[in-house]
Amino acid sequence: MTGSATEPAEPSELVERLSQALGSGAVLTGEDIEARSCDPFTHLPPASPALLRPRSTDEVAAILAQCHAAGQPVVIHGGRTGVAGGAIASASELVVSLERMNRIIEVDPIGGTMTVEAGVAIEAVQDAAAAHGLFYPIDLGSKGTATVGGTIATNAGGNRVIRWGMTRQNILGLEVVLADGTVLDLLNRFIKNNTGYDLKQLFIGSEGTLGVVCKAVLRLVPGPTSQNVALVSLDSFAKVVELLGRARGLPQLSAFEVMWQDYYAIVSGDPARRLVDPAAAFYVLVEAMGYDEENDRDAFTGLLEQAFEDGLVVDAVIASSGKQAEDIWRVREGSEILVREMGPFISFDISVDIRRADEFVVAVRAALADAFDACRSVAFGHLGDSNIHIGVHVGPDTRERTHEIEACVYGVLRDFGGALTAEHGIGTLKRDFLPEHVSPAALATMRQVRRALDPDNLVNRHVMFES
Ligand SMILES: Cc1cc2nc3c(=O)[nH]c(=O)nc-3n(C[C@H](O)[C@H](O)[C@H](O)COP(=O)(O)OP(=O)(O)OC[C@H]3O[C@@H](n4cnc5c(N)ncnc54)[C@H](O)[C@@H]3O)c2cc1C
């Protein structure tokens, strides 16, 4: 990595030129940059000499064309909620932030689409869709700040993947600016369009290594009219898997979120989040969203009553209002409590075979206990999607020991044939492990794609691959 992450460089002649071209307020330097962070947990400020805030695709194209001509690397910023270190900017890179490209351009209720600029926050998209009786299914704890562009770049998953898929499944079209300033219009609005390669898919999940997403056409679905949510406790993982098998029988199943005891013990320290007995081994948030209030409710409560009768579930609370549904979701979204109670910690975002998820967690804990004198961990995640998050703390020097912790966890992961990242992406933090988790041919092909679109390695140059 070139440049220090802590010593900002002097603004260059290029920055002066860009500043004049983009107008006042478009370029931030000095204290205005230092007050920002590149990520949500360590709050590392960008070390860049300048942060550029274009207002349009043309301005993004002009910035990239000038940077390309000058051989100047850039890092792209959306909402900076990414947890893979993809937005970390060194002193040799300029930041291009999409924060002023935040317009909702059009909602088309007949076509079921919304066209937006990439800097719009996910929650704003959800609100705009709801105003038309429509629904954008991508939903994540960071939705107030995470942007459409960032979620496309990371192919974000979140809470409702089991029903509506990842970001990839919810995007119809994109507008992207390539590293040399070329504008690529892929703003398809049709569900069916087989006209050549579906190039937009290349950019979804590319973590900004192939270009800057400037606009997107989102696919909307009719707004669900029923939401049933419950928090249940169970005493074995076999019962969790059995409950998931049964819950899959509900066509409306929209979330199946699992929390291991250690996660719930920490989060339920907040009395408002202690909704069921905190002594069970596992906790599951089950949600179903549908379009027939009465029948959906009957099917949902029928599932849970049967689970009770069959001894699958120990305790349960079923939301009887929208407020109670939110309270239950707050149990699952307790990341700020984890940061407060367990920080510093290293977080993992992996996929494994659902049936072996607990076996995996047990094996990880055993490996960590062998490797570290004092180790604390919590496990939770979108189990219905095979996705588990694990937070690991090994003492005040946890961050300094990141690589050792990662080597330990990823070693177990390889034995289980799991995926290195389920939804957060490789970023800069998991880059070193990528070669061990994909085949040499797959890695070489990924690099070829990268080189084809950005031969000088100027956009997000430290993301995903070693330079
Ligand atoms: C409390 C919390 C809960 C979260 N829950 C989830 C979850 O459930 N599921 C999940 O998947 N993630 C989750 N995340 C992670 C994060 O919110 C997502 O990765 C999100 O997609 C990042 O969006 P962003 O706009 O903040 O992107 P940023 O953090 O700004 O950027 C992320 C990456 O995308 C690149 N990028 C950003 N914008 C663009 C663009 N316009 N064009 C090209 N590249 C771009 C950046 O360079 C960087 O590499 C969570 C994070 C927090 C803090």
Image (cartoon, grey):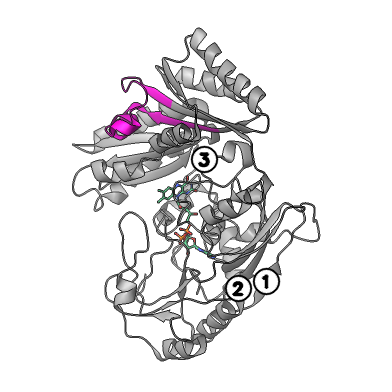
Q: Where does the N terminus fall, quadrant-wise?
A: bottom left
| Numbered circle sitting on residue 184 | 1
Q: Residue at x 45, y 61 (%)?
A: 79
Judge: label 3 CB < 8 Å from ligand 1.
yes
Q: Which residues are magenta?
A: 255-283
Q: Disc 1 marks which amino acid?
A: Leu
In this picture, is 213 found above or below 303?
Answer: below
In this picture, is 176 found above or below 370?
Answer: below
Secondary structure beneath label 2 = loop
Secondary structure beneath label 1 = strand
| Disc 1 to disc 2: CB gap under 8 Å | yes
Q: Position of residue 160 (x, y in %)?
A: 56, 39
Q: What whole-number distance in Å separates the C-alpha atoms at marks 3 and 2?
A: 31 Å
Neighbourhood count class around disc 3 (C-alpha, 10 Å): few under 14, some 14–19, many 20 upward: many
- Between 204 and 32, which is closer to the camera in this rendering? 32
Which residue matches tag 3? 159
